[in-house]
Amino acid sequence: FPLPPQPTYPALQANVGFALLAFIGAVLSVPEVGEAFIAKGLKGWDQLKKGSNRNTGPWIPECLGLPCASLYLLLMMLFIPFPFSHIFQGTNGNGPGREAFPKGELTLYLSSLLSLLTATMLGFIDDLFDIRWRHKLPIPLIAAVPTLVVYYAEGGWTWVVLPESLGKLLSYLGFSGWEGTKSIDLGFLYYVYLALLPTFTTNSINIVAGVNGVEVTQAFIIALSVAFNDLLFLPIWPRWLLVLLGNVGNPDEGRMLSWAAGEVVKRHLMSLYFMVPLIGVCAGFLWHNWYPATAFPGDTFCYFTGMAFAAVAIQGHFSKTMILFFLPQIFNFILSCPQLFGLVECPRHRLPHFNPSTGLLTPSRVVFDKAPPFKTRITLEILELFGLTEIERTPVHEEPSKSGESKPKSGAKKPTRIVSASNLTILNYLLVVFGPMHEQTLCLALGAVQVASSVLAFGIRYGVGSLVYGG
Ligand code: UD1
Ligand code: MG
């Protein structure tokens, strides 16, 4: 069938230009401001390097997410007129005219910027005052309020599509009225879920940390995945690909993949406007944060990138797809829960341990001076069963009996107690499974896991998507 002419996206082309500026800006500005950050006390010692010490350094400037976030926000502000350039032409009679200005889209854009600004500020406060994680967990909730209110004002979709198979299963199990149910309205609960999304996206990146480059690598790969997903919704794909995907014969959709339609295209364009410069700024900062790092991102970086993901997912109505791009972070969060919620002790730092004699990283450990309580023991033993932690035990000398003699039963297992266990993070887990690794290799391994999960995410979303998302 005849394909309509390929549409052009001048604002998107300009956006790619802004991404290049973000990349160059980050590459140039980070080393420029490093000294000033150290002078103000925003510095950290690289815990995984030979000769580095918590009292004497050498110091690496910390919190350089701040210049990155500032650069990004500045560029995103300068970019505001571009998506609306066709309206400005209207004032001299060529375009749709001022009265047709899409105020809704502008509000979406501005509220996302506001959420990003708030997240950056809160991240910076965290870097300055080192808030305990328990207290900082709900902070992004506040930062999400502008985005959520605009989501409400823009129609506030609170329905979730149900997989057909679930409807069938429920009616098979005897629940009447579910046959053929396509979607349900979660109402207020949906807002609770959306409000929790930024809390998750910001904190989950922040707790896969401590190895040079690892926070930025996560954000970089997630941003690339989101941008690729957005591109799938634009009518730009060549005919051979449509044939390959069995999508020819959709004259209404033209070059579009069948699931995309007008409004959806707009939302994904908006998401691209935020993601493409984010890719630029992440790549630019990675230049300095890659092993051996000369700059640390700080919590500011994790907060602002995490909020960018949450904002585009909420505004673009693809929060479930976004969650799929966070599979390694979900794994890390679930694995961390016993330590985050006090079942197992949580040291201030859980980053892997550096062995100066081999130059390799091994899992860091939580050490128990005395026998851990029952809840800790049972949690660790269950995790050990699944290979998720490595436990070290020591034989216990039995208390001598009252008569003064200990009577070891022949053949009985010698009693032991837990002395230490590897910290419950995905980075330590990778070291437990694959053995000691160089710091750069571990960052690459985490990057590979992130890429593999994105591939899996696309498979789930568009392959078995009909099962999970109802098509
Ligand atoms: C989170 C983790 C913590 C981990 C820390 C590492 C949880 C609950 N918190 O805490 O376990 O130890 O991140 O960032 O899981 N650093 C390096 N090399 C790097 C990056 C950081 O040695 O490549 C060290 C530096 O000493 C730096 C410090 O980590 O000063 C920054 O830690 P911070 O971001 O403040 O820790 P949290 O985010 O609170
Ligand atoms: Mg941090």
Image (tube, rainbow, N blue to C red):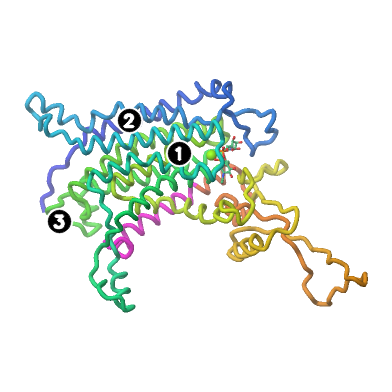
Q: Nearer the viewer, mark 2 or mark 1?
A: 1
Residue 351, disc: none
Seen from this angle, which residue lies furthest left?
93
Amino acid type at image mark 1 = Tyr
Q: Nearer the viewer, residue 263 or 246?
A: 263
Which of the 4 image quarters holds residue 327? bottom left
Position in image of residue 401 (x %, y %): 88, 70
Residue marked by disc 2: 76
Asked if the stretch drawn in magenta spans residue 247, the answer is no
Q: Compute the Cα span from label 1 to label 3.
A: 42 Å
The residue identified by callout 1 is 303
Cα separation between marks 2 and 1:
17 Å
> Magenta part mainly helix, strand or loop?
helix
Task: Look at the picture and state if 2 lies above or below 359.
Answer: below
Which region shows up in magenta? 447-471
Q: Is mark 3 within 8 Å of ligand 2?
A: no
C-alpha gap between disc 3 and disc 2: 36 Å
Categorize mark 3 by other alpha carbons within 10 Å: few (<14), some (14-19), many (20+): some
Q: Which mark is residue 250?
A: 3
Disc 3 and disc 2 in contact, CB within 8 angstroms:
no
Q: Earlier in the sequence, mark 2 or mark 1?
A: 2
